[in-house]
Amino acid sequence: MNKIPAFAFLCLLCSGNLAAQDELCKGAYFTEAQGRAFLEEHAPAALNDWQHRAEQIRTRIREGMQLETLPAKPLSEPIMHSKKIMDGYTVENVAFESLPGFYVTGNLYRPLTPQKSYAGILCPHGHWSDPDGRFHEQMQMRCATLARMGAVVFAWDMIGYGDSKQCDHKLSKGLQLQTINSTRALDFLLSLSGVDPARIGITGASGGGTQTFLLTALDPRIKVSVPCVMVSAHFFGGCTCESGMPIHKKNDFQTNNVEIAALAAPRPMLLISDGDDWTKNNPAVEYPFMQKIYRLYKKENSVALVHLADEKHDYGPSKRKAMYPFMAKYLKLDLKAVTGSDGNIDETSSKVLDQADLEVFNDTHPRPANAVMGDEAVMKLLVR
């Protein structure tokens, strides 16, 4: 066999890296007009056309993430401690391995009242701070309120946030690692006693919205999804954890986040959008496309939009109050448990705890000794 000279090999390697960079669709990759035109051009005429296109998109996502197959699931037991009894729900601090030596860290919210079975809901967070991630008021309020409605809810850290300090958030393969973590979070949720696999939902905003529609696209175990302030025809996510690997483009193949979100069909999906970010066109651009896809399945009533034109980019009270009835309807939750005498949803029994109360690793519960630390060590776990 002829050997490639070292210089030629380096040239090939560099050209490959340049090609990969050219295939990244970062931030506002399209103009608004280009995003609209793309959806118009790719609106399928028949269900068979869409199903073929959907499989192409899923293949591109998996190949772009270098996740054609998932790594083996670690067999270690979850770490769970510091159970807190609240008004109608409990909160526990949780960690488990997604890869040998990498720990997913988060909080588990459960209803206080026993039930024959429970809906399960995943709550990924976005790039908010002060406090960051899962400790943020918007995260705690929605997790606690969904638990008071009867769901078992799991909120976990993005890499580099909260207790997840084994690598930097801007890890070059952060998108791959966070998708592995999301999948293992779902595994964990389904492993809990009484959680009904037919009633599994996911909802997150901003970067958590990206995690929401990506996991829904790839994992049929998700039955209901609510991506908030994220689904856009022209914006592809501004962070490495969203668009840092080539999941949208390869050679002459191109997709966008609306098509990825549409892979949820015919499972129920609620889009929540606002008038101050890249979701401002949802009523006229993104939502009509989603309706077309759901109509192919004769499930047009399973997709919905709540557009709050005067609001900004967050998962604030009005957005949460749009999400709760949708989850209650499709996951058979008790909306009355969080409805006040005036008929409005009342979140006042949901409490915001101090970060110290929710942290998984501390002096009493140190990070396990096998935890790999640093970007280089974590990247080695991802090379398979």
Image (spheres, rainbow, N blue to C red):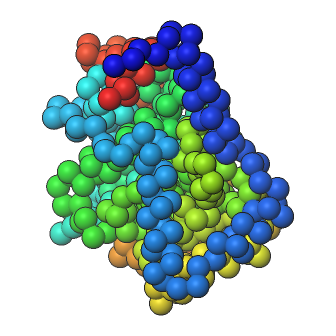
Q: What's the residue at 57%, 42% (across, down)?
A: 246
Quadrant location of the C terminus in the rendered image? top left
Residue at the top extreme? 6
Q: What's the residue at 58%, 85% (across, down)?
A: 45
Residue 81 in view: no
Residue 328 pos. (x, y %): 43, 74
Q: Nearer the viewer, residue 378 or 40?
A: 40
Q: What's the residue at 38%, 42% (across, down)?
A: 67
Q: Nearer the viewer, residue 28 or 3?
A: 3
Q: Nearer the viewer, residue 176 or 348?
A: 176
Is 248 situated left or right of 187 in this image? right
State the image quarter where residue 309 is shown. bottom right
Quadrant location of the N terminus in the rendered image? top left
Residue 75 pos. (x, y %): 16, 35
Residue at the bottom extreme? 298
Residue 96 pos. (x, y %): 28, 34
Residue at the front extreme? 2
Residue 213 pos. (x, y %): 51, 58
On screen, 12 above or below 116? above
Q: What's the residue at 42%, 22% (across, down)?
A: 379
On screen, 208 above or below 80? below
On screen, 308 above or below 83? below
